[in-house]
């Protein structure tokens, strides 16, 4: 299937490793031009180089922190200066710390809101005008299954991503007439550095051996395995494509079947 992404310009966050790097690689393989961003080099430059070598894609990289407004302007400014347009915005990065809700202070909450919610609000505000010019755009957010089915210890993300899902559904109703879609993916356990850290921290919070926590998580996944970053990237590439033109305002879990609910 031709996804119709050749020549499109995509901004991909958290692109130096894990899910973001896999998304960047999938979009580049479809012929998209990329702005990849994250906080640190050499990881970001190396990821971009690997994707350039594999696909020949045109790629700009930007170092920035998703919690900082000036970095959002830097990222969007780079896309417009280098490529003259923005067609696809992928909102992906790390995650706020795990821990019990009653133990976080206002500062931790403000950082979590800045990371998981305000960043998407600002980046959407900055990118939608360029998408409107061509009456075509795709915004895809990466959250987690915990946003649909809360897990103790993940509260900062659960609460802020619930806000993001509300923002996205509302925005879908306001920008649909411009040919712009916005959808949210909720990954389950995916094999990245972050999931290894999350397993260790969950074991710590529960005061249980790591092996038990991992084994229990596997039991809850009908497909009985952890997902691969490429399996998230494939769904994102579809949502970002011409082919997904009638899909907007959705929240889709890609979790091996682990979410225990009908919605
Ligand atoms: N892996 C899973 O099992 C899983 C499950 C559900 C949901 N998710 C969600 O999927 C997203 C990606 O996770 P992942 O597993 O791919 O994580 P990862 O392997 O740790 O990669 C995170 C990426 O985001 C960048 N990043 C982190 N904090 C950032 C910040 N403040 N500003 C800008 N960039 C930042 C990192 O680079 P720098 O550190 O250099 O900035 C890196 O490129 C996260 O939101 C995570 O919560 C993951």
Image (cartoon, helix red, strand yellow):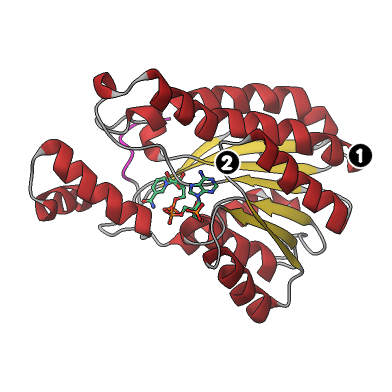
Q: Is residue 214 above or below residue 173?
A: below
Q: Main secondary structure of the magenta part?
A: loop
Q: Position of residue 57 (x, y in %)?
A: 73, 71
Q: How packed is label 2: few (under 14 Cα within 10 Å), some, or many (20 or more)?
A: many
Q: Residue at x 59, y 28 (%)?
A: 118
| Marks 2 & 1, CB-CB < 8 Å contact | no
- The residue that disc 1 covers is 133
Q: Is residue 110 above or below residue 154?
A: above
Q: Residue at x 21, y 50 (%)?
A: 200
Figure quadrant of the C terminus: top left
Residue 166 relative to residue 219: left or right? right
Q: Is residue 167 magenta?
A: no
Q: State the extent of the magenta-drawn residues as a range.
A: 258-263
Look at the image and tell me whether residue 249 can be seen.
no
Q: Position of residue 126 (x, y in %)?
A: 77, 35
Q: Quadrant of residue 233?
A: bottom right
Look at the image and tell me whether residue 147 can be seen.
yes
Q: Is mark 2 within 8 Å of ligand 1?
A: yes
Q: Quadrant of residue 183?
A: top right
> Which is more N-terminal, label 1 or label 2?
2
Q: 145 or 35, which lies in front? A: 35
- The residue that disc 2 covers is 66
Q: 18 or 241, which lies in front? A: 18
Q: Residue at x 73, y 77 (%)?
A: 56
């Amino acid at each position: 299937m031709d996804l119709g992404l050749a020549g499109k310009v995509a901004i991909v966050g958290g692109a130096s490793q894990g899910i973001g790097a896999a998304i960047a690689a999938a979009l580049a393989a479809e012929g998209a031009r990329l702005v990849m961003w994250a906080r640190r080099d050499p990881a970001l430059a190396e990821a971009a180089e690997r994707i350039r070598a594999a696909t020949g894609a045109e790629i700009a990289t930007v170092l920035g922190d998703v919690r900082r407004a000036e970095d959002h302007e830097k990222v969007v400014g780079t896309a417009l200066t280098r490529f003259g347009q923005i067609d696809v915005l992928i909102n992906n990065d790390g995650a706020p710390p795990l821990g019990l809700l009653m133990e976080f202070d206002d500062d931790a909450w403000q950082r979590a809101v800045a990371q998981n919610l305000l960043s998407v609000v600002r980046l959407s505000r900055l990118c939608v005008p360029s998408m409107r010019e061509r009456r075509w755009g795709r915004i895809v957010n990466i959250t987690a299954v915990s946003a649909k089915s809360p897990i103790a210890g993940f509260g900062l993300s659960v609460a802020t991503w619930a806000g993001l899902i509300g923002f996205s559904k509302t925005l879908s109703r306001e920008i649909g007439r411009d040919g712009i879609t916005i959808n949210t993916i909720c990954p389950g356990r995916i094999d990245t550095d972050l999931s290894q850290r999350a397993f260790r921290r969950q074991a710590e919070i529960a005061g249980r051996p790591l092996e038990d926590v991992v084994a229990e998580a596997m039991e809850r996944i009908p497909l009985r395995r952890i997902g691969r970053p490429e399996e998230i990237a494939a769904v994102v590439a579809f949502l970002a494509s011409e082919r997904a033109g009638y899909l907007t305002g959705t929240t889709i879990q890609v979790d091996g079947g682990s979410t225990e609910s009908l919605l």
